[in-house]
Image (spheres, grey):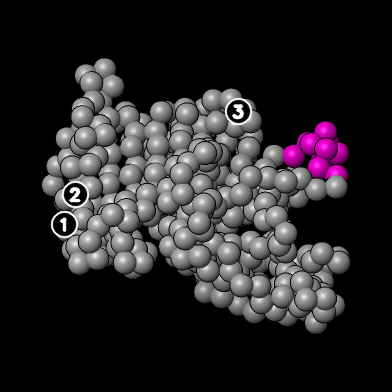
């Protein structure tokens, strides 16, 4: 575990499987500690499970010992799938493998040379990127990366950028956030609707949004609606299909109440790219930021003391694998660095 003033804690964890028992040895500044865990048939380790997932075209489920948590966890790996993304401004085909546990979902991107070019450690909030001697030299003194979360101009709500396949659209009016995927001509928008009467029901608002969407996209037809939950809030979801024969389109429109008004989340993409982008759309729903405090949290603990002039306490930060350079969120102007988790 590292802090701004150096290493504050180190540990070595070694686990050895023998029959139905897993022997775990931990060495830290407090000394050596050993314990045993039940080791079920077929249990494995994360690195081996990831390697098997790279070679598989289908989903892989595994019970594995996680050395970071020092516990046995259940995880699953999506089948390796191809997707078209934008890296350094260029459209690039990569293989994506998503690792899902009870608490998180992280994706790994692999290029045509079977090199890992991007690996999520805590979703888009902490990402390991491929590093070389040249890039390490350029990084001396610090590198500012684009923020993984973007808010509307007033800071009332925002979106997490799922991955670099999506770019934030600049110059958007207050009350709206828009992401675009140039590789597929897809968009994601979150818009505040503040023209409804305060007594308007969610169903009535959703019906009005459906009519509005049809006017903006006359080639698409909005079908039936269903009730869903987004961040524990009631929402109405509508599906729209249409477009031309050469380029059929699809959209999902979600409407939810927000601070006495409503928000509309619209995910629009070519039908041919929908399966590839579906996980990104689901991530957006799980991670919507719907309050100013979530986007600009009040500083507490060591960060607050540092800003007020009190001597600063060590701040723990996650570390990336040795072969990668970690890329946390960019530091907001005038504030201490904060790593948010979607």
Query: Could you tell me which secondary element the residue under label 1 belongs to?
Result: helix
**Which numbered tag is attached to residue 50?**
none
Residue tagged by mark 1? 204
Distance from the alpha carbon under mark 2 to that under mark 3: 38 Å
Front in this rendered view, residue 32 or 11:
11
Label 2: few (<14), some or many (≥20) within 10 Å?
few
Q: Are marks 1 and 2 in contact (CB under 8 Å)?
A: yes
Distance from the alpha carbon under mark 1 to that under mark 2: 6 Å
In the rendered image, residue 296, in percent from the top left (x then y), is placed at 58, 64
Q: Relative to 246, is 315 on the left or the right?
A: right
Is 278 within the magenta?
A: no
Query: Could you tell me which secondary element the residue under label 2 belongs to?
Result: helix
Front in this rendered view, residue 91 or 44:
91
**Mark before the other along the chain sequence, 3 or 1:** 3
For residue 210, what is the image quadrant? Answer: top left
Identity of the residue drawn at 21% across and 29% down: 218
Q: Relative to 287, is 233 on the left or the right?
A: left
Q: Relative to 218, is 293 on the left or the right?
A: right
Residue tagged by mark 3? 89
Q: Are marks 3 and 1 in contact (CB under 8 Å)?
A: no
For residue 250, what is the image quadrant? Answer: top left
Q: Give the residues drawn in magenta, as a range.
A: 131-140
Residue 31, compared with residue 278, is above or below; it is below
**Mark before the other along the chain sequence, 2 or 3:** 3
In the rendered image, residue 236, in percent from the top left (x then y), is placed at 22, 56
Label 3: few (<14), some or many (≥20) within 10 Å?
few
Identity of the residue drawn at 74% across and 39% down: 131
Residue tagged by mark 2? 208
Q: Are marks 2 and 3 in contact (CB under 8 Å)?
A: no
Q: Nearer the viewer, mark 2 or mark 3?
A: 2
Distance from the alpha carbon under mark 3 to that under mark 1: 42 Å
């Amino acid at each position: 575990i590292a802090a701004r003033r150096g290493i504050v804690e180190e540990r070595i964890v070694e686990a050895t499987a023998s029959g139905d028992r897993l022997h775990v040895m931990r060495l830290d500044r407090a000394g050596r500690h050993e314990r045993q865990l039940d080791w079920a048939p077929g249990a494995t380790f994360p690195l081996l499970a990831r390697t098997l997932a790279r070679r598989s075209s289908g989903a892989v489920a595994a019970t594995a010992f996680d050395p970071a948590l020092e516990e046995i966890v259940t995880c699953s790996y999506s089948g390796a799938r191809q997707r078209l993304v934008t890296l350094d401004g260029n459209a690039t085909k990569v293989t994506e493998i998503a690792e899902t546990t009870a608490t998180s979902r992280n994706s790994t991107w692999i290029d045509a040379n079977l090199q890992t070019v991007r690996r999520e450690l805590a979703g888009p909030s902490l990402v390991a990127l491929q590093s070389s001697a040249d890039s390490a030299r350029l990084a001396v003194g610090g590198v500012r990366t684009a923020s993984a979360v973007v808010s509307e101009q007033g800071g009332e709500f925002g979106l997490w950028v799922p991955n670099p396949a999506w770019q934030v659209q600049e110059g958007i009016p207050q009350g709206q956030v828009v992401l675009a995927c140039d590789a597929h001509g897809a968009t994601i928008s979150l818009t505040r609707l503040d023209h409804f009467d305060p007594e308007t029901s969610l169903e009535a608002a959703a019906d009005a949004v459906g009519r509005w969407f049809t006017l903006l996209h006359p080639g698409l037809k909005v079908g039936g609606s269903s009730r869903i939950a987004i961040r524990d809030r009631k929402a109405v979801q509508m599906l729209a299909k249409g477009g031309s024969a050469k380029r059929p389109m699809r959209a999902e429109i979600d409407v939810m109440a927000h601070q006495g008004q409503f928000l509309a989340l619209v995910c629009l993409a070519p039908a041919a790219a929908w399966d590839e982008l579906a996980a990104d759309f689901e991530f957006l729903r799980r991670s919507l930021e719907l309050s100013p405090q979530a986007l600009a949290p009040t500083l507490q603990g060591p960060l607050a003391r540092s800003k007020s002039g009190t001597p600063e306490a060590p701040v723990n930060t996650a570390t990336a694998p040795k072969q990668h350079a970690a890329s946390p969120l960019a530091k907001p102007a005038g504030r201490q660095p904060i790593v948010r988790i979607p």
